[in-house]
Image (cartoon, rainbow, N blue to C red):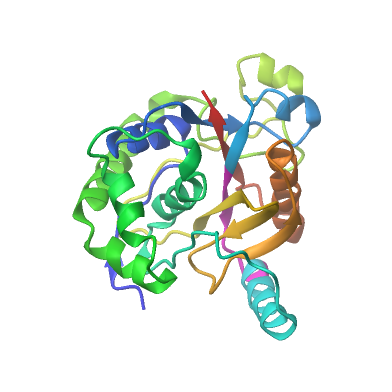
Amino acid sequence: MESHRWLPLEANPEVTNQFLKQLGLHPNWQFVDVYGMEPELLSMVPRPVCAVLLLFPITEKYEVFRIEEEEKIKSEGQDVTESVYFMKQTISNACGTIGLIHAIANNKDKMNFESGSTLKKFLEDSLSMSPEERARYLEKYEAIRVTHESSAHEGQTEGAELGPKSGSYWEANFSSLENVLQQLKPSESHMDYHVEAPSIDEKVDLHFIALVHVDGHLYELDGRKPFPINHGKTSDDTLLEDAIEVCKKFMERDPEELRFNAIALSAA
């Protein structure tokens, strides 16, 4: 039962990168926008990529699928390496921060942390914990909560100035490369929905998940689910393309929805 509530985090690289910097992560890896699924748009994402965060709407269709997926995996089983760092979500609106934790924790060997990093300490302290224990630990981990709140407020106050380049939803048919190169100006073929953080009491039906590569497999990490989801084989070189294939499935389940957005954690 979720007993805590945080202010929702904005799906915006500027906000997430500042958040991670405040938690003591050296900016040798940075989140960047993924403008669409076409190969030429994916080629604009700096490589290598070590994680993708997907923001998507929780709809009735998705909830039906989620329950069916869980029942199928419980019945048939799946392979999940013990190397995957996974935590549950017990805090309302904390899915953005949990997505970031999943992205960093499963790439910890690639990251550089500043001395006294709050995030590094959290990851080290929680390494031997269960997914449920990690969730409870986050509830009491004041340093991350305060930083999350600060970043969420920053997204609210600066959101109107960030423009279509940051935090914009993908359009159902996606932007063309020409539109992107034209400063991502809104047009009939590029729906510009800015993902501005709502208030703490507003009902939020958008949710973050992380897609990461661990031991040769692509994992979907969602704190609302009881376990990681193994989406098959991947590699450091193909992670972005493989993660986008998973994103496509989310979109295909809700073809009338436009509210999808992805950011990638790329080498700076």
Query: Residue placed farthest to the bottom in the image?
Result: 75
Quadrant housing residue 120:
top left
Farthest residue to the top: give it.
182
Residue positioned most to the right = 39
Indicate the position of residue 150 as horizontal and vertical percent values. Answer: 25, 41
In the image, 169 versus 42, the foreground residue is 42
Number of dots carrying numbers: 0
Check the image and report above or below for 233 versus 113: below
Q: Which residues are magenta?
A: 52-61
Drawn side of residue 263 relative to residue 216, left or right: left
- Residue 214 drawn at (x, y percent): 62, 52
- Measuring from the top left, give residue 240's x and y in whole percent: 69, 39
Where does residue 188 sit, x and y in percent of width and height? 71, 29
Image quadrant holding the N terminus, namely bottom left
58 is within the stretch colored magenta: yes
Q: Does the magenta portion include 48?
A: no
- Going 67% across and 21% down the picture, which residue do you hit? 180
Q: What residue is shown at x 34% (from left), y 61% (from top)?
A: 126
Name the quadrant containing residue 244: top right
Return the residue nearer the eye: 193 or 133: 133
Relative to the observer, which residue lies in front, 195 or 244? 244
Magenta highlight: main SS:
strand
* Side of 228 relative to 88 (left or right): right
Q: Is residue 255 visible?
A: no
Q: Is residue 62 above or below residue 35?
A: below
Residue 253: in sight, yes or no? Answer: yes
